[in-house]
Amino acid sequence: MPTRLTDFIARHERIFVLTGAGVSTASGIPDYRDRSGEWKHQKPMEYRDFVGSVAARQRYWARSYFGWQRFSRAAPNPAHLALAGLEQLGRLAHTVTQNVDGLHQRAGSRLLTELHGSLSSVDCLDCGGSLARSDLQQALLDRNPQLALLSGDIAPDGDARLWDFDEARLDIPACRSCGGILKPAVVFFGESVPPARVQQCRDALAGADAMLVVGSSLMVYSGFRFVREAAQLGIPVVAVNRGRTRADELLAFKLEMDCTTALSASLAQLAPGTAAPPGL
Ligand SMILES: [Zn+2]
């Protein structure tokens, strides 16, 4: 029983939570990195490749058309539900997620910032308009009926590896208003998080009395910076993560265990009877 984590949560009441891919793996969404922090899959697409190359966008949309079908059916797991439960108990000041799957929101977290955006929405890079991802999926299928026959393997962030599909033949829909380039409303590798969004998180961290990292190796700077800032502010940081994190030397302690087990157990200890039923 991770009583150390429960004690930590019980001693604080304005906890700033940062979550990463590890919180969603139990929902069937693959993780980027292995336990030593190295890439498990092909590296994700960089922003400059996406905006600079039609071929890159064809590759992205073909793969993510397929990936989204699985991704959009994923459901919150006990780790998401436990964090929403801790928020309802008044322990959490704010949750910041590096994930783009919308599962914290669906689990009931409300004091939430999706640091890297959400795959459920698509933006026009030219006019700033946006549309629902489901509408773009339909537009892709209308123009490319061969997408109905896709098969492949799922990868992180709604990406996939396709079998026997000629990505170069994909006809990509443009913005209906201006004909501009459409991009999922997520921060790509090589792209900055919008400054106002970072500031919202920094403000929440400044008012926090503790920080809890869940399921992140913190290899991406956009998340790591909050741990560094917490350390500078004298805010104690703990982590629940299988394997190494970039901030190990800044942590008060780390639980190297599955975050669904750790968080569910802590919620059950803090509020008996409110924990999610096993298997959810
Ligand atoms: Zn547009």
Image (spheres, helix red, strand yellow):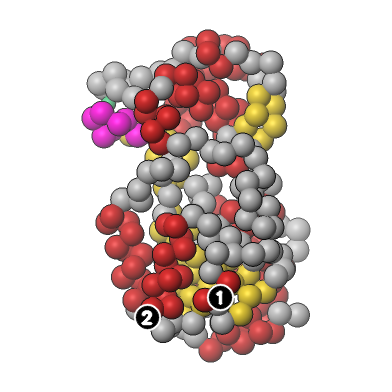
Which residues are the magenta region?
121-129
The quadrant where ligand 1 appears is top left
Please tell me whether mark 2 sits on a helix, a strand or a loop. helix
Q: Determine the residue positioned at 43% across, 78% down.
A: 231
State whether label 2 is within 8 Å of ligand 1.
Answer: no
Between residues 226 and 24, which one lies in front from this camera angle?
A: 226
Between residues 227 and 73, which one lies in front from this camera angle?
A: 227
Q: Which residue is mark 1?
A: 249
Q: Is residue 121 visible?
A: no
The numbered disc on residue 76 is none
Is residue 267 rendered to the left or right of residue 135? Answer: right
Between residues 33 and 111, which one lies in front from this camera angle?
A: 33
Using the image, determine if residue 33 lies above or below residue 48: below
Please tell me whether mark 1 sits on a helix, a strand or a loop. helix
For the residue marked with disc 2, what is the amino acid? Leu
Which badge, 2 or 1, is on the more N-terminal residue?
2
Disc 2, disc 1: CB below 8 Å? no
Q: Quadrant of the C terminus?
A: bottom right
Q: Which residue is mark 2?
A: 233
Between residues 124 and 194, which one lies in front from this camera angle?
A: 194
Q: Quadrant of residue 178?
A: top left
Using the image, determine if residue 227 lies above or below residue 63: below
Residue 266 spot, x, y in % from top left: 65, 77
Residue 211 spot, x, y in % from top left: 48, 75
Q: Determine the residue positioned at 37% across, 25% down.
A: 52
Please tell me whether residue 127 belongs to the stretch shown in magenta.
Answer: yes
For the residue marked with disc 1, what is the amino acid? Glu
Residue 225 spot, x, y in % from top left: 41, 64
Q: Determine the residue positioned at 26% across, 28% down.
A: 126
Is residue 237 rendered to the left or right of residue 200? Answer: right
